[in-house]
Image: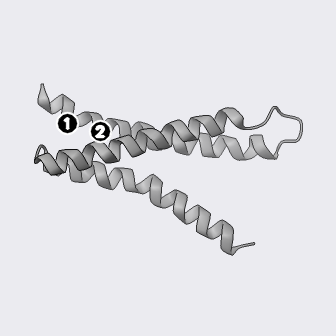
Amino acid sequence: MNSMRDLIPLIAAIVGGAVMAIAFVFAIPAALDGGGSGSLAYQVLFLVGAALVLAAMVMSIVQLVRGRARALAVVTLLVTLAPVLTVILIAVVARTSV
């Protein structure tokens, strides 16, 4: 039973990262399309994915501190860092290319 509970942060990190990526990819054309309704729904999906990733990061840090499933917690932290670093990289590139 505990092994399934230990997998929840990893699953949340994977789902959150996927939601962030999909929302980002579809939000750019929606925002640039002049005749569309905008990209508000994709922005909300992106924020939901970011919240999932942040929650997974916090849960994996709690697992590390408590000493439960340390290897799985480290893997979860690495998975949660990928979308965070990607967003930071995109922000830095956008600021330097202007």
Q: Is residue 47 left or right of residue 58?
A: right
Q: Is residue 52 above or below residue 89?
A: above
Residue 63, given in percent of the width and then of the height, sits at 19, 45
Residue 9 badge: 2
Quarter holding residue 38: top right
Question: Which quadrant of the figure has residue 68?
Answer: top left
Name the residue type under label 2: Pro
Mark 1–mark 2 CB contact (< 8 Å):
yes
The residue at the point 54 percent across, 45 percent down is 21
Q: Which mark is residue 66?
A: none
Q: Quadrant of the N terminus?
A: top left
- Which residue is denoted by mark 1 in the rendering? 6
- Single out the residue that lies furthest toward the right: 35
Kindly identify the residue that appears in the image at 88 percent across and 41 percent down: 34
In the displayed structure image, the side of residue 32 where residue 87 appears, left or right: left
At horizontal 41% and vertical 44% (from top left) the residue drawn is 53
The image position of residue 35, as x and y in percent, is 89, 36
